[in-house]
Image: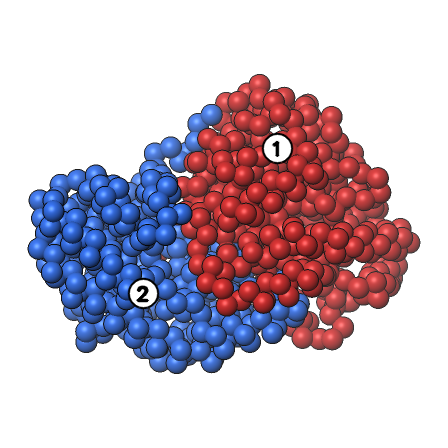
Chain colours: A red, B blue
Amino acid sequence: MKFRTEGIRFPPIVKLREAARKFVGSPDFLDLGQGLPGHIPPRRPLIAFSERILHPAVHRYTPDQGHIELREELALYLRRTSGVHADPHSEVTITAGANQAFAGTVLTIIGKGDNLIIPSPYYFNSVMAVQLVGGKVVDIPVGSGFQPVFEDIEAAVNKRTRGILLVSPNNPTGAVYNRQLIDQVVDLCMDRDIMLISDETYSQLVYDGSTHYSPRSRKDARDHVVTLGSFSKDFGMSGWRTGYLVGPSLFIEEFMKVQDTVTICAPTPGQFLALEILKTGLDAVESEVKRLGFLRDLAYLRIDQIVALETVRTGGTFYLFPQVKGCTDSRKLVLDILQSTKTLVLPGIIFGDAGEGHIRLSIGPLTTEAIDEAFDRLAKYFNSA
Amino acid sequence: MKFRTEGIRFPPIVKLREAARKFVGSPDFLDLGQGLPGHIPPRRPLIAFSERILHPAVHRYTPDQGHIELREELALYLRRTSGVHADPHSEVTITAGANQAFAGTVLTIIGKGDNLIIPSPYYFNSVMAVQLVGGKVVDIPVGSGFQPVFEDIEAAVNKRTRGILLVSPNNPTGAVYNRQLIDQVVDLCMDRDIMLISDETYSQLVYDGSTHYSPRSRKDARDHVVTLGSFSKDFGMSGWRTGYLVGPSLFIEEFMKVQDTVTICAPTPGQFLALEILKTGLDAVESEVKRLGFLRDLAYLRIDQIVALETVRTGGTFYLFPQVKGCTDSRKLVLDILQSTKTLVLPGIIFGDAGEGHIRLSIGPLTTEAIDEAFDRLAKYFNSA
């Protein structure tokens, strides 16, 4: 039997996890592979949610676009935190995670033979989604500080280009894109009548004086920007599969066809929990975001002591993306690190060719003790290599 | 801006709900449109779930294929209830609902220009999923008793056919397909090396001495049958977006690319709850299934008193799919019923051309009182028309 997915590579993290499986039971296995934080959702909203567990509405479908109270509360939150204006009725939809929001956006705008421009390194699921619809990724290597170079993006737009994806703060590099670049890309999208897909999953995780800039805060850009967001990272609810999408109403109308076909609606319990966190849990979320900042400080302090790793300190996320001196096969390196130190990190190559020679370390789920232990091991590994 | 979804019609239920919106606030609005049962998940598993709400594992991603304990428990359950043998490691995956399982299956096997054979009337989301990938639906009107006619299916298979979809018990007709037909379709799929997609969402909702037959219980068919299932209906957890898929391991491997791209994994809370229900809630589920049977009895009793409605009593689901004498425009009829009686039913035409002249009544979410009231209104409406 023939499958239409044969040309798509297998999710790279899944394959690596299989290699790591024999270590996972081991008490001294350290996992720096998973892109999630260590905290769970705040206690008060969780208790409030569990107290309502016998309420019928928790168990039923919401409207396809999502629970209207959540959309309204989210619209207020986005205005406050990112300056984004969004009509909760026509411009906001709740999704089963930002990942489904992205895949759905691709299914809505990218036809066979169309292309999407993506700065590289990139989050590999983005590429898989485009491949799934028979589209092409035009992969543009970033410049210094992992910032995309506007002229390179501009030069890549052709008549089959349907959009440009910017993920800021970025996975895997942690780069917070500067406002000037984002504004240039917005202007370009308006000029060519294509869509800027702005993945802002990590928008709350900015540090060191960086600021997150949401292109949809520009009123003139509202017809050409789709904003993707997630409750997985800052709210600590990755398993609940709850995210959102803000876009022009005409786009939302088309997107809903995909949403209804694929998922009907986002999971209801996650919608209720996210609403409760927006109402009563934001202080607790802020503390967790600060705690992640301390983990970052520690990790950057420790990584600077490893001479084999050249690290650019970026302003966002809980990822470090150092270049490994002399490394030309990051996949082989990562398997060797795993064998030698029982520590899983991700090879840069899975984030695109521009990621080769790098490794991605996620410190999000670790304790300070585990971070110290991980860097002790990596220091020993690289210093003895 | 151009959208690739422009050729796909807007989800018909959403449009109807918009028309019904002005009535929804009204205390005497009756909704026979929604395809879900009235009960919520059993109390004991819900309490057990809520007591574990502070456990970190509830909040994090599971493996893409789903929580392994749930897959194991589900495999035992399927063996017991449907005679299906499935290896929980390689042949089972948990999905964000049976709908996502179906859309993902289509994304896995149907390429542009390929076709899927679907008996009609059909659940409209099936058609939307095929359109989404640029595939074609070959729509085969069913015969008497809403049973598909094997010869018609066989004659429709051509070299671009990638699969045949059977939904039994059926939405919208409630028909439980007979074993002989299903076996013939299995043989055909094996012979032509195409996939039987067996949507068994309503497998537990069989009545009046009907029995559900799962084609994957045939060991020789295991390479050519993908079984879709849902916890939404019998477990009363539609909002949790939790379903599953059982298929050959080679298929599962390809499907996981789509799953990872679209959803990463099914929502974790729903997986924990479904596991708990499988372990401690099946007695309570059985009571609810019986209760739905009483509602069916009442509804069939009442509908027989309306001479304008010709009803075939089918063996499964909580849907009635009567033909309305003289009706050639079910959409117009349904809007008129809504205006005149504040009662929402679905027009047969949205389930395909073969559904025209029919209406679908879902009694799943109603009480006995509401069923009586609904049929009082319909009797009055049709008797005065």
**Residue type, mark 2 in image:** Thr
Q: Tell me which chain the residue with mark 2 is part of.
A: B
Counting from the top left corner in percent of width and height, residue A203 is at 70, 43
Q: Could you tell me residue B159's position as x and y percent?
A: 24, 47
Residue at the far top in the pictured view: A191
- The residue shown at (20%, 69%) is B297
- Decide: is B351 above or below A141: below
> Horizontally, is B112 left or right of A51 in the view?
left
The residue shown at (53%, 59%) is A269
- Position of residue A97 in the picture relative to residue A3 (left or right): right
Tag 1's secondary structure? loop
- For the C terminus of chain B, give its image quadrant: top left
Q: Is residue A50 visible?
A: yes
Q: Mark 1 highlights which residue?
A: A85
Q: Mark 2 points at which residue?
A: B367
Q: In this view, does A7 lie to the left or right of A346?
A: left
